[in-house]
Image (cartoon, helix red, strand yellow):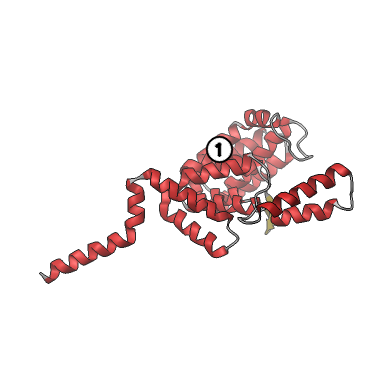
Amino acid sequence: MKNKIIVVALVASISNVAGPIALAHHNPGQGQDRASQAIKQLWSPDEAARAAAKRTLLSLGALAVKPLMSFLVELTTNDHPRYETGKEVEGAQAFEAFKRSRSSGEEKERPGAAQRLADLDISSRLESDLCGLLGSLHADEAIPLLVKLAWSRLAILESLSFRIYLTSSSIAALLQIGSTAVPEIMKAIEAADAEAAEAFNTRAFGPAIQMWQDLANEIRSTLANVLGQIGDPAALPVLQNLVDSSRDKKVKFYSRQAIAEIRRKM
C-alpha cells in the first residue's frame, strides 16, 4: 500500500509540473495562443516580464515557432518604429517630430529628433529577441527566413586573429541551429542571382548596392562567411566553387576564409 501511495504522489507531482506544457501539446491552438501572448510581453519595459515571457516561449518548444516567425516577418517587412508598452504616444510624437525635421529642412533639429526616436524605437531589440528564441529552439522551420535576414539585414563586422566575422541576430540564430542550416544556406548561395534581381526591384539598399549584381555578390559573401562560422565540411564544394568562379574580390575573400576556417576545425 505504501508503494502505491508513493507512485500516485509521484504521478501527481509530474502532472503538476508539466501540466500547462502537456495541455498545450494536446491542444496546439491553445499553445500557439499562449505563445502569441508571451511574444507581446517582449514589448514590456519590465526586464523581468520579458525574461518570463522568453521562458514561457522556450517551454512551449515547437508550438512557439510559428508565432515567433509570424511576428519576425511582420517586424522585418513592415519597417516602422516599435515602442515599449506605455510609450506608444511618446513614440508617435517623436516620429512626427523626426518627419517634420526632415521635411522642413532644419538641419540643426534633425540630429536631436533622430536620437529621440532611436532611444524609443525597440525594433532592433525585438528582432534580436525573436531570432534568439528561434535559434535557442533550433527551429528548422525558420531556417529559410533566418537565411534571408542574414543577408538582407544589417550585419556588423568583427575582426579576430586576422579573420573577419559577420554578426547579426539572424546570423547568431543560424549558428545556434548549426549544420542543419547548411543545406538551405548553400541553396541560397546558388540562387543568389534570382533572389537579388527580385529583391533589388522591391526595396532600397545601401550606397554600395548600385545594381542587382552587387546585391547577389553581397548575398554570396555574407552566406559564405556564415558557412565558415558554422564549420561544416559539407559546405566546402560550394565555397570552392565561389573561389573558382566569382570575379568579386569580397566573395573570393570570404569564401577562402570560410574554407580555411572549416579546415581548421576539422
Q: Which residue reaches farthest bottom?
A: 2
**Secondary structure beneath label 1:** helix
Whole-percent x and y of residue 18? 33, 58
Q: Residue at x 67, y 42 (%)?
A: 79
**Going by the image, does 228 lie left or right of 54?**
right
Q: Residue tagged by mark 1?
A: 186
Residue 223 visible to an observer of this rendering = no
Q: Residue furthest left?
A: 1
> Where residue 245 sits: x, y (%)?
66, 32
Quarter of the view holding residue 191: top right
Q: Residues within 10 Å of mark 1 (few under 14, many from 20)?
A: many
Badge 1 amino acid = Met
Q: Name the quadrant of the N terminus.
A: bottom left
In the image, taking residue 30 as reference, residue 238 lies left or right, namely right
Q: Which quadrant of the figure has residue 255? A: top right
Query: Where does the image place residue 183, in percent across and percent down from the top left?
Result: 51, 39
At x 53% / y 65%, what residue is drawn?
A: 48
Q: Tell which residue pokes out farthest to the front in this image.
A: 89
Identify the residue at horizontal 76%, vertical 47% (top origin).
96
Asked whether 11 or 168 is in front, the reply is 11
